[in-house]
Amino acid sequence: MINLSKKLIREVAKANAKFSLIKDNDKVLLGLSGGKDSLALAHLLKRMQVHAPFKFELKAVTLSYGMGEDYTKLHNHCKEYGIDHEVIDSNIYEISGDTIRKNSSFCSYFSRMRRGALYTYALENNFNKLAIAHHLDDAVESFFMNFIYNGSLRSLAPKYKSKRGVEVIRPLIFVRERQLRENAITNELEVIGNEFCPGMKLSEKNVKFPHAREEAKQLLANLEKENPKLFTSLKTAFENIHTDSFFVVKDNG
């Protein structure tokens, strides 16, 4: 088992207890990209499986976009640490040229396609939970992106039921990204970065590179310098929403 920090373990345990993310007899499918976030989650869930006072099944799957990606090192890593892992193939990259809209963001397109493939695998193999590695920074960035660019107050829920009936859970929702970065460095994990991102191959085509998230990251970094407790305050705010103080028209009929 890798050296997981007590704080990482504690934050995941708190989220699981608060939101009932994983329960007895659940079958949990983990979307494992091999990046620092999902790789940390794989080890945290494996530890939970060993030490939790309840039993659940866990399997990690990595989606290949059909670009000739080599996930041998990732698969061997999972095998070394007793994490059940499978690479599932797709032709998402091949069909993207015909199905992605002109001037659209490749990130949103491939995210939707990847999630759809994971839903299909989960349903076909009787998994009732899909774990994804979004963390607190992702939730806060999504809130600011929706607030600034879309005119809506939305973030990332710790769990939700997809339209296809799979419950999506985010066990890292209380974890800061820097903790996951430190975890990868401490354990010398060989993580996968942008080298397997389909967008790298689409960069010369008429496809937008995402900018909103990077701008939100920079804005939040500047705000956090002035207020080191910013993310703590926002995490509390996400649980303390006063809907009656907004411009919401209520139907009194």
Image: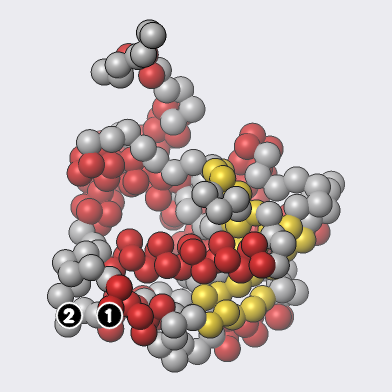
Q: Nearer the viewer, residue 142 or 122?
A: 122
Amino acid type for the residue under numbered disc 1 = Gly
Q: Nearer the viewer, residue 30 or 135?
A: 30
Residue at the outermost top position: 252
Determine whether 58 is above or below 55 in the image. below
Quarter-wise, where is residue 244 in the image? top left
Quarter-wise, where is residue 58 in the image? bottom right
What percent of the width, then of the height, locates residue 242?
40, 17
Q: Would residue 110 be found to the left or right of residue 36 on screen?
A: left
Residue 7 visible in the snapshot: no
Q: Residues within 10 Å of mark 1 (few under 14, many from 20)?
A: few
What percent of the width, then of the height, locates residue 249?
30, 16
Q: Would residue 95 be found to the left or right of residue 157 on screen?
A: left
Residue 203 visible in the snapshot: yes
Mark-to-mark CA distance, 2 and 1: 10 Å
Q: Nearer the viewer, residue 248 or 158?
A: 248
Determine whether 104 is above or below 213 in the image. below
Label ID, residue 77: none
Quarter-wise, where is residue 232 in the image? top left
In this rendering, which labeled residue sits more in front, label 2 or label 1?
1
What percent of the width, then of the height, locates residue 159?
56, 43
- Residue at position x 53%, y 49% from top? 162
- Residue at position x 36%, y 13% from top? 251
What percent of the width, then of the height, locates residue 218?
23, 51
Residue at the outermost front position: 253
Amino acid type for the residue under numbered disc 2 = Lys
Q: Secondary structure at mark 1?
A: helix
Residue labelled with disc 2 = 205
- Residue at position x 72%, y 73% from top? 84
Residue labelled with disc 1 = 97
The chosen color scheme is secondary structure
